[in-house]
Amino acid sequence: MKKQIEFGLPRSQKYLTSLLVSVVQGLSAVALLATSAWLISRAAQQPAIMYLSIAIVGVRTFALARASLRYAERWLSHDAVLRETGNRRAAVFSRMIDFAPAGFGKQSISDLGTRVVADVEETQNLGLRVISPLIQSVVVSLISTIVFAFMLPAAAGVMSSLLLLAFVVALPLSALIAGRADSQSASERAQLATKTGRLLENLELLNAYGWTPHAFEDIESAQTALAKSSRLQAISLGFAQAIFSFGAAASAVVAAVIGASEIANNHYDAVMLAVFALLPLAVFDVASAAQPIIGVWQRYRASADRLIEVVERELPDELKFAGTNDMAELKTLELIGAEAGYPGSESVLRNFSLKIKRGEVIALVGPSGSGKSTIALLMAGLLKLRMGDLKLNGISADDLSVASIRKQVGYLEQNAAIFNSSVRVNLKIANPDATDDELISVLRSVSLWSMFSKREGLDTVVGERGVLISGGEAQRLALARALLADFTLILLDEPTANVDEAQSMSLVKELIEVAKGNQRMLVLITHDNKLAELADRKIEL
Amino acid sequence: MREAKAARWFFAGVVVFALLGTLSTIGFAFELTQLVVNSPAANGWLALGAAAVKAASMIGQEWFSAIAANRVKSQLRSRLLDQITEANSTWISRQNTSELQLLLTTGLDSLDAYFAKFLPQIVYTAFAMPIYVLVIFTQDALSALTILVTMPLIPLFMVFIGWATAKVQARQLASLTALSAHFADAIRGITTLRVFGRAEAQVEIMRANSEQHRKRTMKVLSVSFLSGFALELIASLAVALVAVSIGLRLIDGTITLAAGLLVLVLAPDAYLPLRMIGANFHASADGVAAIQRTFVLIDSLAETNSLRTAQKVQPIPGQLLVLSGPSGSGKTTALKALINQKTAWMPQGSVLLEGTVRSNIVGPGSYDQDLLERATRLAVLDDLDFELEVGASFANISGGQLQRVALARAFYRALAKECSTILLDEPSSAIDSGRAERVANALAELAREGFAVVVVSHQSNLIQAADKVIELAK
């Protein structure tokens, strides 16, 4: 639990201030009712009005304070939490970078993304809806009980026991009623979100095959499970409210009875009776802000656990790059007796060797699962060998800084990510300093400029995952991006899978020409033998 | 909204519990006051009894509200999903799936605040407030009047401030959605960013975006919190006003202590319903936005469903037709225009559904083993175990295998549902040449059997095998 609290707790000065403000606000609320009670009781004794003037001013002040401090507290706490959440987003993403792509195992990166985004949003609730109300309730209750104890110790004793009962028994008991409904509902909600997401992604297909009703049924059952959880949660919340309400009433009655007897024994002036009776009501009113926190805590905890797992996961050896020397301009690359595999899985590559030097174009051909993509990851500095050696310019890759390797070796994935932004933004990932002319020129080289120029040019938005352009166009855009980066060695994973044949052959021929012209290296990973024939050498796996 | 009708008995239940709560609150306040003024009729046990009834009614209220909210939500979700099923591909491609997904999950969840809290609150207020005011009136007419006069200020302020923040809140929701979508986008493309050495820079961009979002959100919150402030202020000041006025009249002796105390205890309760509405209004605004967005979507669906893209291509039974042309020339669009109940379609960029290889081919429910075997033979799917679990991560099967599964899926449908037309979009682009040749033969075989086979492809072997080739220009 400590780790989960530490993970999401806002640590800024602003947040601490908001906590302080909320305590003072709670005390103002209690003071408002107590002072009003005193005012009325005193007035009943019909004194001269000037005896009441302080109380009158007090009542108005506390009323004002109660409202304005609430505003201040909300403003401060929200500001603090928003800032922390922004930092958390960046921290989680930063941690995930080291694991991409080989370290995510069988998880779908898309699912992971959706979950992480939702979980980070959820972490805001710790500061806003758990810690803040808890601190307010507990501290205000404590201070009020102490003050009350100076006046009517016996009644204060009863009130504090009932408060304790409410906090220590009612809250956990209500959590028990909810059962694991709170944390379960979080995962049920996530399931519903994932299922709905998949339905929407695959909608065209499901519709065309008439499978949508079945997918709906699936969602229906997820919905029903969630409905049951939320019912239990509601009952448990009602239960907590009920205990606080009854506790308040009982404390008030006891205080009234004990107070009356104390007054009868002349220990106190009759004026105080109303104050004694009403004070517990006010204190419980403030304390009841803590009622819903158990539910919120459970939901937060589920999200926090997932994020902590992402952030604290140990980087596997295959992804630890420790070299420090910068690589000079790449002239040769050699794999010797390489054995490699995805972390936690068996090796897919065994005793593999390859050599490539400047101006060469080679093709890697082989059936699926033969490790072609693994070879690409090895060469691109995204995965380390388990056995064997990787030498660049004759120097072992372990001694070279992986950042300098990645500057010169580029890997174009099979379904490269197109970002939901403009063409310009997508291309500038390769070179943020590129001028528009350079961008247009590289688009021309993949025969994409005419298409975009008919739309909004470089400002054309290419939509979520590139849906506003065809599959072939998306692939060529990714290729343009890789060209713009001016890599010395480019690894192309199935570069022409969605491009029409006439164009794909000419595209690859052109790439090869450019590669040779600039003395670059090109590695084609393809299943297409015809394409592989264009290379200088073919390596079969 | 007709979905609300489904839950009307539960809403009624909520109101009943709420009324019970009101009456018991009044009962308790009365007894407590009697205790304080040392009346001989005072009975502590009666007070505790009333408190117990109030406590029980709280549980009942929460429970029934939850049931009501769940019913409405699931009905609304079902209705939306039903409409989405009828949607055509034009509408689908225009949508932002993460926005839709957010709407169907978080968006509809915010209806919880609307139906489980806000709506019952409104109804409760309509019943409970008059009762409180009436009781107060019997004790002290002036206080009742004060409360009546200050009460309308609350909804007035709520409406005013709500109206002022509505636009900014909508923009706020858009900003949050954009931020989340951007975050998710970055995670999806994390490998690409890493390859180009831009991942670290993205962290900074993310930080900057979050900072901007924070500034924008705080601006919105500064105004929307004002509504909460106004509510609290009005309620607190009103109580203060009542207390002072009672105090002054107690001095004059024009009111009894018992009456004055009862009014003091009940006054906050009289404002409570409206204050709760105010508190939940903020949250319910999300719910309202979600409902509005849902209806906008349903309307846009109805619109595009009536649009039909013109059919450029006429499939002929027994003919293997290949559509070729440069990318972007509209081949996929032309193909999709032909999809209907009697066609079996294989999309470009094949899709894998959660389940086994077999369930990906035959779908849910029972299947015909013979037809399955034929379909997989035609698709040359000879290297996969049918029981293999595949899922959202394609890490366990290759691109070529995936394509052949999709082929088998289309073939199975064509055979099992006796379709007249088979539509294939780039069916062998990722398949090795040996198998691709056999696929071409399979297509010719199916055409000979009487199917109209329409294929989008740029591969020469398919173009050669075709009976007819249509070249689409840009």
Image (cartoon, coloured by chain):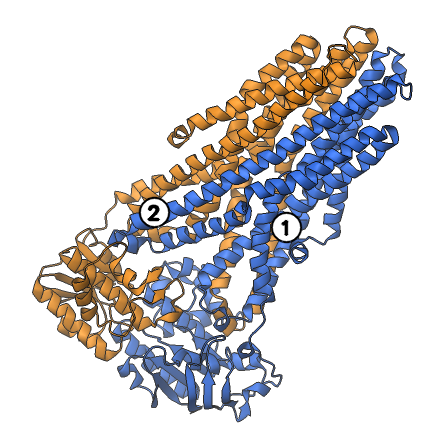
Chain colours: A blue, B orange
Figure check: B401 above or below B284: below
Identify the residue shown where x is 62% and y is 20%: B24
Q: Residue furthest front?
A: B45
User: Judging from the image, what secondary structure is the residue with disc 2 in?
Assistant: helix
Where on the picture, by quarter, is residue A312? bottom right
Q: Which residue is mark 2?
A: A217
Residue A391 location (% of width, % of height)? 51, 90
Is any part of residue A242 visible from this angle?
Answer: yes
Q: Which residue is mark 1?
A: A82
Figure check: A244 above or below A490: above
Q: Residues within 10 Å of mark 2 (few under 14, many from 20)?
A: few
Where on the picture, by quarter, is residue B358? bottom left
Q: Nearer the viewer, residue A247 or A328?
A: A247
A192 relative to A264 in the view: left or right: left
Amino acid of disc 2: Glu
Which one is in front in this view, the residue at disc 1 or the one at disc 2? Answer: 2
